[in-house]
Image (spheres, coloured by chain):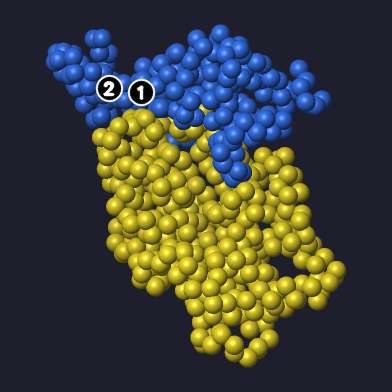
Chain colours: A yellow, B blue
């Protein structure tokens, strides 16, 4: 398998199937692990890093049929390819931007990725569409067991799995669920939700967001604490809060409809209109408008669009994806033109900016 | 002790070392976060909040330590990877697994502040912690071997090489002569 084959796939986090998939996008668990016999990555020499990578490459290739596993040396990748992997949530921004020997192994279905020499020697991640934390845990636990049978992890009787940063020590586990919360943003209640989650040590972060304004109103909720609770407890805590937030989001949507159905319908229709007719459009504006349209489809205000297409557009209109699909390096203004073209053609079924309203 | 800014109990005891004369602050978690974010926390992403918090804490302060104690603890060095506690405080990242053992006195309160707990209760590897500790010694022996070679002490380097091989092959490590 090759990197370019991934452009044909839908990203796991945006596949958008499963129960409550109008709000719950995806579930993700990551485990931080380190080899016992090497310094942590920040302290490792170039030779150490190389040896860590060799040892873990062997271990990782043992867990899955190697032909289905895509193994990539990140340092050898072009910038656009690194960004592409970040947009698909297969590597972290830090992994894309850091230096030195480092790698990622990705399975063909993109359900897991394993980063080597990120902040820790190993960052194992499993992703699933919809709310499916138990299955996600089963898979990551299996991968972890398989790796553990081949290498010796750094483990301490009292502190558990040892990590470069004490914030990850213990289980080394971050459990997260990605939610689409446009109505909570629109009704300005999202900050309140953040604050109450922080009180029970859950963290909220926006998707690729700067500060609290998340791109496309996607928010990721995850555990803050990694030590002193079992994996099952940590999973349960995130799992149990999701229905509560879904309920808040539904109430906010009901409120918007009740308060002024015309305003809401107008907002959604204008967003749809711009996406279908714009000649040049930024990634930020696209995300913002797609978010409104996505909510509109889910509320029955737009009838001629399917959610999977919208989910796909969120991903394909991002800078690196657009360039991979076009097969050319584009500067920001060319990307905006190409993005608008891509949106028009996919939202119309024809490349005709002023086609008839079907809605 | 109460937080200096509200009535909640102070759980963060900060010794600010910037201007040469140490200043002690006692804050609740909320005000500690506020204080830290004002003092220039890099990332606003909440997932990195804990990491940033730990980093800042490690960088600017020691938990419950006076300035003199802090200066003394700073100089302590891990015999395995060679980083000092000061290195950890300035980078926010540890150097090797053994740091959790050799800096435990300083790290334990930090870990308690971050997690509210200090004991792991989750999954454990099949081989437990013993195999791990044995392997971690390799970090020390490899470093010492490099030093021995640099000093042209080939006898010591040879002994260390044998010890390293034994551990790498999974036998239990024997005492070396140093």
What is the x, y in percent for residue A241? 70, 50
Nearest the viewer among B115 and B152 is: B152
> Mark number for residue B143?
2
- Residue A64: tell me if it is visible: no
Residue at the image point whose x is 56% and y is 8% from the top: B68
Residue at the image point whose x is 48% and y is 67% from the top: A333
Q: Is residue A288 above or below residue B177?
A: below
Give the labeled residue for mark 1: B81
Residue at the image point whose x is 35% and y is 26% from the top: B136
Nearest the viewer among B81 and A191 is: A191
Q: Is residue B8 above or below residue A242?
A: above
Please tell me in which quadrant of the rendered image residue A49 appears: top left
Q: CA distance from mark 2 to mark 1?
A: 8 Å
What is the x, y in percent for residue A215? 60, 59
Please tell me in which quadrant of the rendered image residue B60 appears: top right
Taking the image as shown, residue A221 lies to the left or right of residue A334, namely right
Nearest the viewer among A158 and A323 is: A323
Taking the image as shown, residue A229 lies to the left or right of residue A164, namely right
Q: Residues within 10 Å of mark 2 (few under 14, many from 20)?
A: some
**Residue with the most extreme right position:** A259
Q: Residues within 10 Å of mark 1 (few under 14, many from 20)?
A: many
Label 1 sits on a secondary structure element that is loop
Please tell me in which quadrant of the rendered image residue A327 appears: bottom left
Taking the image as shown, residue B19 lies to the left or right of residue A103, namely right
- In the picture, the quarter occupied by the N terminus of chain B is top right
Badges 2 and 1, same chain: yes
What is the x, y in percent for residue A316? 48, 69
Do the CB atoms of the residues marked 2 and 1 lie less than 8 Å apart? yes
**Residue with the most extreme bottom position:** A356
């Amino acid at each position: 398998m090759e990197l370019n084959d991934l452009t044909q796939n839908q990203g796991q986090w945006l596949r958008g199937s499963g129960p409550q998939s109008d709000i719950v996008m995806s579930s993700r668990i990551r485990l931080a692990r380190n080899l016992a016999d090497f310094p942590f990555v920040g302290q490792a020499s170039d030779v150490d890093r190389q040896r860590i990578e060799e040892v873990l490459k062997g271990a990782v290739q043992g867990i899955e049929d190697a032909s289905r596993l895509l193994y990539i040396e990140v340092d050898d990748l072009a910038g656009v390819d690194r960004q592409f992997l970040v947009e698909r949530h297969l590597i972290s921004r830090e992994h894309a931007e850091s230096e030195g020997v480092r790698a990622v192994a990705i399975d063909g279905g993109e359900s897991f990725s394993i980063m080597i020499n990120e902040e820790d020697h190993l960052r194992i991640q499993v992703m699933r569409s919809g709310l499916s934390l138990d299955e996600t845990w089963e898979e990551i636990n299996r991968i972890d067991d398989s790796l553990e049978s081949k290498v010796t992890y750094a483990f301490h009787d009292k502190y558990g799995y040892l990590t470069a940063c004490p914030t990850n020590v213990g289980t080394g586990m971050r459990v997260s669920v990605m939610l689409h919360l446009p109505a909570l943003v629109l009704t300005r209640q999202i900050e309140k939700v953040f604050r109450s989650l922080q009180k029970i040590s859950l963290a909220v972060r926006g998707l690729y967001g700067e500060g609290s304004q998340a791109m496309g109103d996607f928010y990721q909720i995850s555990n803050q604490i990694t030590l002193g609770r079992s994996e099952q407890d940590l999973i349960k805590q995130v799992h149990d809060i999701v229905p509560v937030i879904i309920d808040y989001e539904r109430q906010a949507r009901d409120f918007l409809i009740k308060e002024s159905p015309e305003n809401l319908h107008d907002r959604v229709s204008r967003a749809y209109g711009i996406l279908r007719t714009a000649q040049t459009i930024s990634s930020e504006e696209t995300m913002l408008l797609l978010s409104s349209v996505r909510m509109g489809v889910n509320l029955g205000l737009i009838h001629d669009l399917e959610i999977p297409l919208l989910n796909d557009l969120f991903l394909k209109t991002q800078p690196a994806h657009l360039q991979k699909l076009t097969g050319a390096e584009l500067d920001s203004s060319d990307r905006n033109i190409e993005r608008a073209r891509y949106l028009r053609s996919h939202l119309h079924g024809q490349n005709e900016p002023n086609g008839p309203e079907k809605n | 002790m109460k937080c200096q800014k509200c009535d909640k109990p102070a759980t963060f005891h900060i010794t600010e070392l910037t201007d040469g004369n140490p200043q002690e602050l006692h804050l609740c978690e909320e005000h500690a976060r506020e204080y830290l974010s004002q003092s220039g926390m890099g990332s606003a992403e909440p997932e990195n909040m804990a990491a940033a918090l730990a980093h800042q804490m490690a960088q600017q302060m020691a938990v419950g330590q006076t300035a003199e104690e802090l200066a003394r603890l700073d100089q302590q060095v891990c015999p395995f990877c060679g980083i000092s506690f000061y290195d950890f405080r300035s980078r926010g990242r540890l150097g090797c697994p053994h740091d959790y053992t050799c800096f435990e006195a300083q790290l334990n309160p930090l870990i308690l502040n971050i997690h509210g707990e200090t004991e792991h209760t989750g999954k454990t590897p099949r081989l437990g912690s013993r195999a791990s500790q044995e392997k971690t010694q390799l970090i020390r022996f490899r470093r010492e071997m490099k030093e021995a070679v640099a000093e042209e002490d080939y006898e010591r380097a040879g002994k260390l090489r044998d010890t390293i091989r034994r551990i790498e092959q999974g036998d239990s490590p024997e005492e070396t002569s140093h």
